[in-house]
Amino acid sequence: MMEKNKRINWSEKRVLEELEILGSKLNHPIRQKDMESPLINACFRYFGGLENAKKVIGLESSKIVWDKKLRAFLKDNQDLSFEELSNKIKKSKGSIKTQKSRMGLRNTKKWNSEYDEVIRNNYKKMNNVEIGKLINKSGDSVQQRIIKLNLKRTPEELFNLMSHKLEEHPNWKNGKSFEPYNKSFNNKFKRAIRKRDNQICMLCSTHKEKLKKALDIHHINYDKLLSLPQNCVSLCHSCHMKTNFNRNHWVKFFQSILSEKYNYNYSDNQEIVMEAII
Ligand SMILES: [Zn+2]
């Protein structure tokens, strides 16, 4: 490499020498970002640009090589998610969409419409991970896509989907004790939640034996219609009262406790990610 602070008397010959030295040190074709600015300038001055200078001494062109690689890569990996694709091709200039259209590959919109139909037809049977795998290809989040498609699941459908997944879960021994939604917030459900929480208040750790009455079941997001294990937590009456204030704080607080204790998943905007329990 060129020594810093040392004035170089540039010439065509000197530019080529520097490029050869640099090229032998790199395990990829020389790009401008590998070079210091005096050399870049000299390339332009004597050869009209880096690629021209490289051509003179038979060095590989980074541009062409990359495009070839990209073309091959994209053709071999059409099923990758957008995130995976963008990670792979972020070195290259232009958006994924631009790159893909340059390669003559299908664009985002077409992917969307193909998968939208599948999602639309199977929405009530699919969990968010399954939907996510399809939606990934469109570059949207699950929530964005569901909103765009104007899809809704009733609480009953949601609960049935949940119960189904719970029963499949080998670590969830009480899964079968959860009734369909319309009867779900009953004593059986509450007992199962207290049992899951080892009969202690999840805030102050007081055991039910020390309390004169049963532990309350608190709905974490304050939606009493959403009686899912992920949304319910055992609290003593005194702690339950505290949750009437600073609601945002408590939602995050209990979700973080449950996600740690039971591997439930919640999104950044405090929604339940159902598949965490699969
Ligand atoms: Zn308590």
Image (tube, rainbow, N blue to C red):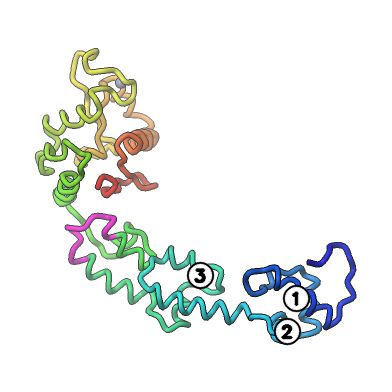
Q: Earlier in the sequence, mark 3 or mark 1?
A: 1
Q: Residues within 10 Å of mark 1 (few under 14, many from 20)?
A: many
Quarter of the rendering containing residue 184: top left
Does the image show residue 88?
Answer: yes
Instruction: Identify the residue position indicated by label 1 in the image.
Output: 19
Which amino acid lies under the numbered mark 2 shown in the image of this protein? Ile
Q: Is residue 275 left or right of residue 181?
A: right
Position of 201 relative to 77 (above/below): above
Query: Does the magenta-highlighted stretch encompass residue 41?
Result: no
Position of 203 relative to 266 (above/below): above
Q: Is the CB–ligand 1 distance for label 2 below 8 Å?
A: no
Ligand 1 shown in quarter: top left
The number of callouts visible is 3
Position of 254 relative to 106 (above/below): above
Instruction: State the residue at coordinates (78%, 66%).
Output: 1
Q: Earlier in the sequence, mark 2 or mark 3?
A: 2
In this rendering, the label closer to the viewer, 2 or 3: 2
Instruction: Identify the residue position indicated by label 3 in the image.
Output: 89
Q: Report the disc number at residue 70.
A: none
Tell me the SS state at disc 3: helix
Q: Report the disc number at residue 57.
A: 2
Query: Magenta segment, which residues?
Result: 120-131
**Nearest to the observer: residue 241 or residue 130:** 130
User: Residue 238, percent across and down?
Assistant: 29, 19
Which amino acid lies under the numbered mark 3 shown in the image of this protein? Ile
Q: Earlier in the sequence, mark 1 or mark 2?
A: 1
- Label 1 and label 2: CA atoms lie apart by 9 Å
